[in-house]
Amino acid sequence: MQTIELTCASAIIKFLKNQYIEIDGVQSQFVTGLMGIFGHGNVAGLGQAIAENPEGDFPFFQAKNEQAMVHSAIAYSKSLNRSKIYACTTSVGPGATNMITGAATATTNRIPVLLLPSDIFANRIPNPVLQQLEHPLSHDISVNDCFKAVSKFWDRINRPEQILTSLPEAMRVLMNASETGAVTICLPEDVQAQKYQYPISFFEKRVYIQRRMPPTSFEIQNLKKILSEAQSPLIVAGGGVHYSNASSELKEFCEKYKIGCSFTQAGTGCLESNHEYALGSIGTTGNLAANSIAENADLVLGFGCRYSDFTTASKTQFKNLDVKFVNININEMDAKKHGGFSIPADLKATLAIMNSDQSRHETSSEYQGKIKSLKEAWLNEYQELTHPQKKADDKWHQSELIRVLNDFTDESSTIVHAAGGLPGDLHKLWRSKDAKDYHSEYAYSCMGYEIAGALGVKLANPDREVYAVLGDGSYLMLNHEIVTSIQENKKITIILVNNFGYQCIHNLQRGCGGRSFGNEFRYRKVDKELDGERLSVDFAQNAQSLGAKVFNAFNEGEFLDALKAAKNEKGTSLIYTEVEPSTPLKGYSWWDVPISEISNDQKVQKTYKEYIEQKKEQRFYY
């Protein structure tokens, strides 16, 4: 057996460079490069290895925050329908644990990302080392054990030869459409630098074929039968439609069977919004059309969705007592939700079979007419919501901003959002023109994802105009990757919507009967609560100091001018605007937020009684 002597770190880089994925006959390098921040745990290990990479064909991407780095890697892979990833490396201790939130974001969203956090010495001789957490239970525990709960595969490499079995398993999980998520390989800092005689065959090109798992004939026949009996079906399209590259098959299916299609946050864009059967957003952040059809649906076709509580309106959205579920999802856990008929198969392959079926069953003309009339009714409401009545001295509304941005952007643009009030309003109001014009991280709804995520989208799609849309709360949490976008010459446009606090939760707080408390950004009065004047934060100056070109816009005309100017910029820009703090849009369904059962506040008591009544609408779908 031929061998080659390498350090463990060098062997990891050499191995990762030669991992390929094949989807529908097209091969591509799976691990594009390495994102990282170096510290004493990895600078002489993985850092030295990538610096000495002889081919120079595995680029290093320098991040400014470890959590943001993982967010960029997630957005990169999500944009490319999980066909490529970046690996992420950190030093020991805080550098490693900073990635845990990112790991949870990846796994919750079913997005592959490879995490390579450094770990404490395997030989234990210098223990306790700098940044080591000493645990009284075992000397084998480090902070990296925290990754176990948020990883789809986890391992610790205590000897350099252990990567021979660990890395292939990591690749299997990452490229498995039904199992993918965060994979964490912990690398003790001494092991990274240790040498070993590795088999040369370990570094040969490996191709992992991502097979499209077809449905069985029984599943297809049963689906046809259930479909033929349905009078008012509804499709709930999730992110799996994108990841399966099944948008064209979905469109054909809707047109063949004439069924309305609603979208989760991750599924938005599966069909263009102007398509005849595109109903738009469903659930807690859903619109009039989709939610009205959902309430009476006797059949829910879950296509690549995971049925979050926002999608099901906390299990109150589907009110038909005889409703049935058919779930087509490569992830068997998601396919079996709500006790529906489970088809754990590839969505694209399944829809292709259904579309080729010669026997036709179309919905009734009455059902089709209902879809048309509800879409028209929703468009009328859309006009009202995006052209709100205001007093002369009011700031403009978030819904107006969304309309202007939506009208300005085209098929080659992508908006990125994740947390606060913006995702709900965007889900309800955004009218997609292209499958990739709407990038939402809402499975984990992680504040701070937006700017880093926009950078990841830009890395994946250099020719697209990418817009990070976020509030002041998210900006204050993670804005560091403005610097990275400038360093890497990856232009993004940041739209910072200042509503002076955590207004999404502020609205929820008051909607639950509570008083305003702790959610607005205000000065503390002496010996009193945070209920003084609003904080004065110069976000524009902050962004400018990080290198961004800044535009201010405080109304529709100024915002449109700023969008035009930012598009002509070669580098990263930030558009700063202020909106009315409390302008929640009309809702069309419920969300379960428990109300205090005991309170001296009469508003809370009243809200609790209403809550109990709404709880009666909840159903256990099985």
Image (tube, helix red, strand yellow):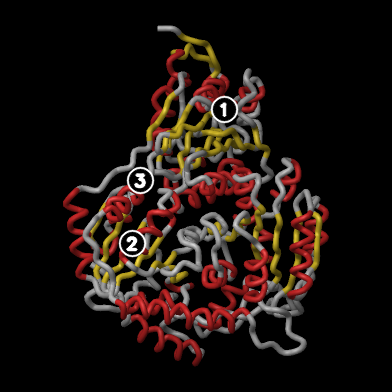
Badge 2 vs badge 1, beta-carbon distance below 8 Å? no
Which dot marks residue 189?
1
Report the mark closest to the observer, 2 or 1.
2
Q: CA distance from mark 3 to mark 1?
A: 32 Å
- How many tags in the picture? 3
Amino acid under label 1? Glu
Q: Which residue is mark 3?
A: 178
On the image, the x and y values in percent for residue 97 come to 56, 45
Query: Residue extending furthest top?
Result: 1
Label 3 SS: loop
Tell me if residue 10 can be seen.
Answer: yes
Q: Quadrant of residue 6?
A: top right
Q: CA distance from mark 2 to mark 1?
A: 46 Å
On the image, the x and y values in percent for residue 374 come to 43, 80
Label 2 SS: strand
Amino acid under label 2? Gly
On the image, the x and y values in percent for residue 79 come to 54, 48
Residue under the image location 48 percent in, 87 percent down: 604
Q: CA distance from mark 3 to mark 2?
A: 16 Å
Compared to 260, does 37 lie above or below?
A: above
Q: Quadrant of the N terminus?
A: top left
Residue under the image location 71 percent in, 79 percent down: 396
Q: Which residue is mark 2?
A: 302
* Mark found first going from the N terminus, 2 or 1: 1
Q: Quadrant of residue 564?
A: bottom right
Compared to 319, does 180 lie above or below?
A: above
Amino acid under label 3? Ser
> In the displayed structure, does residue 289 sit left or right of residue 342?
right
